[in-house]
Amino acid sequence: MFSSENTPVLPAVQTAGARTIYDFPVHFYTYDLFDKIRRTVPIIDAAISKLIRLIGSFHVQCSDPKQQRALETFLFNVPVGLTGQSIYSFIDSYLDSLLIYGNAVGEIVLDKKNSYITGLWNGNIRDISVAPASSPMERQFFLHTKDGEKLLPHPERILFSALKPPSGGIYGISLLQGLPALANILLRIYESVGQNFDRAGNIRYAVTYKPSDSSDFAYAKERAEVIAQEWSAGMQAARCGEIRDFVSVGDIDIKVIGADSEMPSTEIPVRQLLEQILSKLSVPPFLLGLSWSSTERMSAQQADILTSELEYYRRLLEPVIRKISLSFLQLHGSFSDVSIIWDNINLQDEVELAQARLYSAQAQEIEQNLN
């Protein structure tokens, strides 16, 4: 839409209220909570790492064959932060932030003359705030500093993605949303298991000396001290691999403390909690080494669900990859388009595609013979 002076006029968004845009509750302290959950619950960390690796690789195809070689060289060799290299390293860190915090931010770093891309930077989402600009369709970014929020002057260089943001909102929702309560219960169970093994697993003995007559009562204290010393010496010797027999005279009773009580079973509650966690992360149990009983059909269905989740994450990453690639081409004087070609997620997809082509060819041959 243009005015009579040929200046662009931004369309007004009628359903974008100020409340839905600005007042969305973003509590940055929850990011620390999500970090703690990932560090303390190994299965959550393993599931997220598995999702990042299962996203697979991709290939950027340029519409101009003359620019293809230069584009590939750039994507494979572009510096990422202080330690990384290639766009694949950038995307892995970018997706990690997107899954953990629900938001990810990065930057295309240019030289001082803005003539070429010197690298890519994975930003810390805690340091960045996002708000609408003059139009709800435009974004502006603020950097948190000691002196307050600083408006970033080049928003076109910023890469930002949100995971499943609510309607009218800017910030996304973490994949770990809803898991803190479950993780807290799970950790309490593991902590109680450790405490129970400290109490009952580390066997302790109760040695009771019972005097039989009045003469034994007269020397009961001295005999009890001798028994305690010999028993303690025998236990210390066992730690060094030496076996000592305990020989005594009189009525002495030796029992294991807590031997009559059984350790509470945690298999059922732990499995119920893990089922809830894995259902939220959409990772099949067999991918994490959990040997839960499942049929072949069920495993195939779980793999299909995981594939759909991975396809969704790929759709979130494609605009970021396109923006980086197009920025490189435009800085080199080319306005060619690019397309993102993803590798198939696993070998099973290749087999199923081959079978589908085979069945289609057989059906086509049968139809031709009938005609």
Image (cartoon, grey):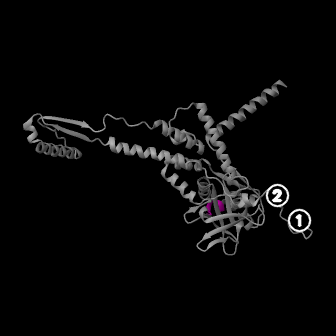
> Looking at the picture, how far across and down is residue 173, in whole percent?
64, 53
Q: Identify residue type, mark 2.
A: Gln
Q: Residue furthest top?
A: 370
Residue that appears at 61% across and 40% down: 347
Mark yes or no: residue 124 visible. no
**Dot 2 corresponds to which residue?**
14
Pointer 1 or 2: first along the chain: 1
The span shown in magenta is 73-78
Quadrant housing residue 109 = bottom right
> Looking at the picture, how far across and down is residue 223, in whole percent?
11, 42
Residue that appears at 52% across and 50% down: 45
Residue that appears at 23% across and 40% down: 206
Residue that appears at 64% across and 42% down: 307
Above or below residue 305? Residue 38 is: below
Q: What kind of element bears circle 2?
A: loop
Q: What kind of element bears circle 1?
A: loop
| Apparent side of residue 331 relative to residue 267 in the rendered image (left or right) | right
Quadrant housing residue 349 = top right
| Apparent side of residue 338 relative to residue 251 in the rendered image (left or right) | right
**Dot 1 corresponds to which residue?**
2
Q: Quadrant of the C terminus?
A: top right
Q: CA distance from mark 1 to mark 2?
A: 19 Å
In depth, the one of 231 and 358 nearer the eye is 231
Q: Residue furthest front?
A: 214
Q: Which mark is residue 263?
A: none
> Looking at the picture, how far across and down is residue 309, in whole percent?
65, 45
Q: Identify residue type, mark 1.
A: Phe
Mark yes or no: residue 210 visible. yes
Above or below residue 233? Residue 371 is: above
Above or below residue 275? Residue 363 is: above
